[in-house]
Amino acid sequence: MSKEKSLLKNTAIVTVGRVCTQLLSFLLLPLYTVYLSTEEYGVVDLLNTLISLLIPVLTFQVDQGVFRFLIDKREEKKEQNKLITTVSLFLFVQIIIYSIIFIIVNRFIHNDYKYFLLANLIVSSVANYTLQITRGFGDNKKYAIASFLSGAITIILNVALIASLKMGATGMLWATFAGQLICTIYVVVSTKLYKYIKIKAFSNEKLKEILKYSIPLIPNAISWWVVNASDRLIIYKFLDIGQNGIYSVANKFSNIITTIYGIFNITWTESASINIGQDDKNEFFSKIFRVTIEFFSALSLGLIAYMPIAFKILVNGNYIEAYNQIPILILGTFFSILVTFIGSIYVANKVTKEIAKTSIITAIINVVVNIVFINKIGLYAASLSTLIAWFTMFLYRYYDSKKYVNMKVNKMIILKIMVVTIVTFVIYYIKINWISIINAIFITFFSLYLNKNNISFIKETIKQRRRG
């Protein structure tokens, strides 16, 4: 099987497991905005934001380390035992330490949801770790099933606890906890993970090797958190928690792109690591980069073009302010996925220090721009600072990564995308219904034109699979 077809197959497997629950979760947005006040939604979003910050600090990013090192040891059972035992025991000790710290500082925390912070932090860290092990094994089917179970349980409990039992923010947090717990249990049982853990296999040398790889990813993860999530804290500080809820709803739409790319990136990172040493790496990476630009620019433009039609249907009127932030956040997210794509080159070469360096600079840009302008332009400061930060990081990483892979882009395609993006932005903000409808139709055909080669490749691959 060619590298491209293998990547397509693995992506399709993971997509089946994740896209259904992610789509349903998005369609439940009207439920959340009806049953939760902007303050409740803002509290849940803020808590999840803090958890996303603390996970890399708690785990030292060893989940990413075990994934990368397992790729190279798929045929060596003893090395797998050593890796998984070493990292599992390290993570267990980390959880104990953080639990003790929480017990000590607990008395100084005056918040109704503080126990969810610890519980969801622990269960999310363990779930992430077990999922990365399935990726390291190359078992994308189990990864997909685990992701599906996590999403499905969370969605079902959200409906039951929010709509039926009226538990509000507490219901959402319980649902998240249960979904992550079920995910962990499934992976442990289905992979028989406990059989890989043998106390005698623990290795200080292996732990040092993994930490050398993973520790530089901590500032990278925190920097990503700063770019993606610090906006919420700044909004809460300078505006109010209700504005944070509005900003969170605006992000729901750009998160569609992040989610879809996240599905692709699961298999792309693996493929990049496997093929980084091949003679044709420049051609292979350039081709996948082109496909990524074409597909996700079409998706981004489509979301913006159809938003004037869909917004009133999907979002309660209390969140109307979110409308103006959506296209800026979508464009910022587009650049963020290109940043992530290029980051896979650094991961494949195990040069995680380069990842940390570029991420820290980007985080500083995001915070400075946000703080300087938030009192002047309100929520726009959060959206624009995110866009500026991701665009800056993309430019740097694109040229810096040429030290490892010389990726080329079609300048004419880029020019066409830029022109169409500018026109779509103008139409979005003038808010004339009939023009928006015409533009949505045009964007549909433009997207098909942009991806005509990719569509043909997928069709041909499917035909070959049927013949086989």
Image: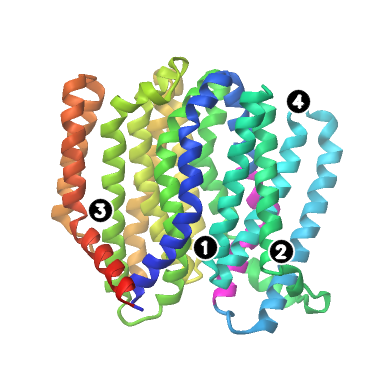
Whether the magenta-drawn stretch holds residue 59 is answered as yes
Q: Residues within 10 Å of mark 3 (few under 14, many from 20)?
A: many
In this view, the mark in front (3 or 1): 3
What element does badge 2 sit on? helix
Quarter of the rendering containing residue 185: bottom right
> Which image quadrant: the C terminus?
bottom left
Q: Position of residue 295 (x, y in %)?
A: 28, 52
Mark nearer the N terminus (4 vs 1): 4
Residue kind at label 2, given as amino acid type: Val
Whether tag 3 and tag 1 are in contact, CB under 8 A, the answer is no
What element does badge 4 sit on? loop
In this view, the mark in front (3 or 2): 2
What element does badge 1 sit on? helix
Q: Which residues are magenta?
A: 52-71
Residue kind at label 1, given as amino acid type: Lys
- Tell me which colouring the rendered structure shows: rainbow
Q: Position of residue 413 (x, y in %)?
A: 16, 53
What residue sits right under mark 3 in the picture?
A: 294
